[in-house]
Image: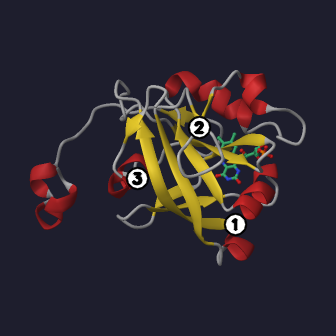
Amino acid sequence: MNGFVPYPVRDTFRLIEPGPTVLISTSDGTRDNLMTNAFNMPVRHDGILAVVVGTWDASFATLQASRQCVIGIPGPELMRTTVQVGNCSGDDLDKWEHFGLTRVPGVNVAAPLIGECMANIECKVEDDSLVEEYSLWLLRTTAAWVRPDADLTAEFHHRGNGTFSTNGELHDLREQMTKWKYFSN
Ligand SMILES: Cc1cc2nc3c(=O)[nH]c(=O)nc-3n(C[C@H](O)[C@H](O)[C@H](O)COP(=O)(O)O)c2cc1C
């Protein structure tokens, strides 16, 4: 599918657990939007994820109305674009056109996958009971996609003050994960 291959829903926690800076794609059916998100986490091993999307984002209203989104995981070549996507509002411009990003149709949601990302996770809102107090959306993965040639360890991380880090050496401690063998293959 436009260069993406399916990725197991039960493994999507592995895409989010390292703490990537992500792009969130939403659509109201006529207008597609993008925002940058760094407050995200896996919640359960069956594809439940959580993201903070606040009322200060135009994406909030779209997520609230559509109850679905796509989480795209960019590689380091998209670092500057990712910051710039987070500096402007979809109310003022079409970020897809402005940043030259490619819409790829998903299978379960109207929001497009982001063609330039390493991975894309299609999500539906599972629980919004923490949104009012914490802007925290619990999402259920309905499908996930990766580029077969992508280095999925190449996500980048926002360090909270406008500085970003990429990954250095990978430390393989799988043989020590004795209680958690299931998650160590
Ligand atoms: C590095 C970075 C991380 C961000 N993380 C979040 C986040 O976790 N949650 C959030 O609501 N906004 C976050 N933002 C801000 C939104 O991306 C920003 O408000 C954006 O303009 C929203 O776009 P929209 O108004 O078109 O939805 C972040 C911005 C940057 C640059």
Front-most of residues 30 and 119: 30
Front-most of residues 141 and 99: 141
Label 1: which secondary element: loop
Q: Residue at x 38, y 41 (%)?
A: 6
Q: Is residue 120 visible?
A: yes
Q: CA distance from mark 2 to mark 3?
A: 25 Å
Amino acid type of the residue that numbered disc 3 sits on in the rendered structure: Glu
Viewed as shown, does residue 31 lie left or right of 118? right
Q: Quadrant of residue 179?
A: bottom left
Q: CA distance from mark 2 to mark 1?
A: 27 Å
Label 3: which secondary element: loop
Q: Which residue is mark 3?
A: 17
Which labelled disc corresponds to residue 105?
2
x and y percent of residue 161 in the render?
Answer: 65, 42
Q: Which residue is mark 1?
A: 135
Q: Residue at x 74, y 74 (%)?
A: 132
Few, some or many residues within 10 Å of mark 1 (<14, 14–19, 20+): some
Q: Residue at x 64, y 32 (%)?
A: 82
Which labelled disc corresponds to residue 169?
none
